[in-house]
Each structure stands twice: as C-alpha cells, then as structure tokens.
Amino acid sequence: MSPRVTLPATAYEPAVELPAIGQGTWYMGEGRAPRPDEVRALQHGLELGLTLIDTAEMYADGGAEEVVGEALAGRRDRAFLVSKVYPWNAGRESAIEACERSLKRLGTDSLDLYLLHWPGNVPLEETLEAFERLREQGKIRRFGVSNFDVDELETLAALPGGDACAVNQVLYHLGSRGIEHSLRPLMQRLGMPLMAYCPLAQAGQLRRDLFDHPAVREVADGLGITPAQLLLAWAIRPVEGRRDAIAIPKAVQPPHVEQNAGALNVRLDDDALARLDEAFPAPNKKVPLDIV
C-alpha cells in the first residue's frame, strides 16, 4: 500500500488518511501553461491516487482556484481540497468573506482544510474565531497554518482552540532542512503533520539545483529512479519512526505527474539516506524559517 499520513481526529471530524504526496497549484492559472493542460494534469493526478490538492487565494489572484474548480467538476468527492487565506483577510469577518470567495471559485460548498497562509497582523484569536464559525457553517472541515515557525506555533497552540490546528505547511526539501532542528520536533510533539511545499527545491532562500547534484544523481541512478522521485521520497520518509510528511509538488506535464505518483512506491534504504545526509547535512542549530 502506498504510504499515507494520518490527520488526527478532532472533536468534529474523524481521523483521515491522506496520500503522502499530493498536488500543488502554485503558478497555475497564470498563463504559463495552457489551462486545459493544467486541468488535465490535476485530473490525471487524481486518477493516480494524488488526491490531496493544495491551492490558495493568492495563487494567480484566485486563478489557480478556478483551475482546480474546473478540474474537480464532477469529481469533488474524490479530492481532499486545501486552500489558504491571506493574512490580511484572516479577520473575524474578512476570513468568512475570503473563504466564500474561494468556495465560489472552486465550485464547491466546503473545503477539507483551510490554512492561514502566513502569520500576519490580525490577532490569531480573531482568525481562530473565524475558522470556528466557518466550521460550524460547514464551509471548512479543518483548519491549519502555513509558514509558522516555532514561536508562532507555540503561541497558536497555547490559545483556546489552537490545539485543533491540523497541519503546518512550510518549505522543506533536501537542500533546506532547517525545520529539522526545532520546528519539526515541536510539530511531532504536538501531533501535527507537516505539509512540505517546494519539495523539489524549486524555491526558497536556500534554493539549489539539486537535480544535477552528484550525490542526488548517484543515489537516484542506483535506485533506477529520477532525481525528482528521489527528492519526493526523501521528503516523505519516516522520521523518528513516524511518517507524518505530505509533499505537494506541482506538475503540468503528464510524465511529471506520473513520476510524482511513482515516488510513492520508492523506498530509501539506510545507505541511500546516509549518503544524502552526508551531502546535505541537517543543521546543528536553529536557523530562520525558509520561506517564499
């Protein structure tokens, strides 16, 4: 069975198992690729088991949500749908309005998960209140956050209702391992899964062309897989005996979608992991959160 990650049960929702690789949509809806190709890519991913689709009101000013909505027409029940709200739209009333706009673009009446895109100036208490109202109205099932570092996450967890936060979505890839020192251990203590964006190292302060790195090439070739599949398999590997990371790569071309899905079947042995650790060591101290 392909690796899956469990979102814990809440007071209102049962635990749910998700594939450890989903589909991202950053840059979709911007005209960089033909819209029909983007729609077909998401549908192809669904067929291959990549049922989590992540988007945001920020992406193409809602254009990515419209692409997702078109892809999910007649298929909504097959997807675990995630979207995100701008920090300045995360107020007591503005979050309700922002979510309703997202739902309209997505052509659905509810989100499976709604994230605060990054920490902002709106008090978290207000955002939590809005998320709870959205849940009561049946417009979202769970809430989470994105780009929260240790301090912000500890603040959130201490607030009433903050312990219901389902995930923290942060930048994470082989060349950017800063979260492993302090943030990921905190998330594991909180029982909070990680959602890794840019898992193919295509962005971030520590962006590197990992596909052509000798160690990546050597390990991938030895396993008979592509560098992209190696990076995805590494991102979702069990840590401390726990599989709690979901990677959300974006793909438009069918072969790339198929490679992403194929990475679910890749198992990295101790030797492969050791060679990658040697080439890309984890930090030995807290570093600033990598973010784009």
Image (cartoon, rainbow, N blue to C red):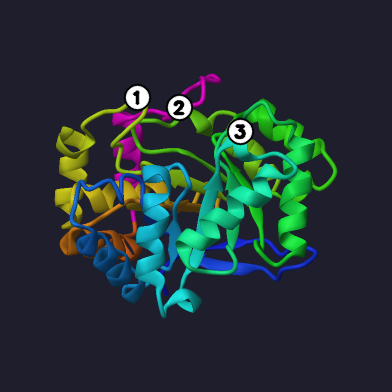
Type of the residue with mark 2: Asp
Q: Which mark is residue 88?
A: 3
Predominant SS of the magenta segment: loop
Residue numbers of the magenta segment: 268-292
Q: In the picture provided, is 143 more to the left or to the right than 248?
A: right
Residue designated by label 2: 290
Separation of residues labelled 2 and 3 (CA atoms): 21 Å
Q: Residue at x 77, y 39 (%)?
A: 126
Q: x and y percent of residue 169 in the render?
A: 52, 43
Residue designated by label 1: 206
Q: How packed is label 3: few (under 14 Cα within 10 Å), some, or many (20 or more)?
A: some
Q: Nearer the viewer, residue 41 or 13?
A: 41
Type of the residue with mark 1: Leu
Would you say the residues marked 1 and 2 are in contact, meaning their CB atoms lie under 8 Å apart? yes
Q: Residue at x 31, y 71 (%)?
A: 43
Along the polypeptide, which appears first: circle 1 or circle 2? 1
Q: Residue at x 68, y 34 (%)?
A: 153
Above or below: residue 224 compared with residue 204: below
Q: Nearer the viewer, mark 1 or mark 3?
A: 3
Separation of residues labelled 1 and 2 (CA atoms): 7 Å
Q: Residue at x 65, y 63 (%)?
A: 139
Q: Nearer the viewer, residue 59 or 265?
A: 59
Q: x and y percent of residue 270 in the render?
A: 37, 48
Is residue 27 part of the magenta span, yes or no? no
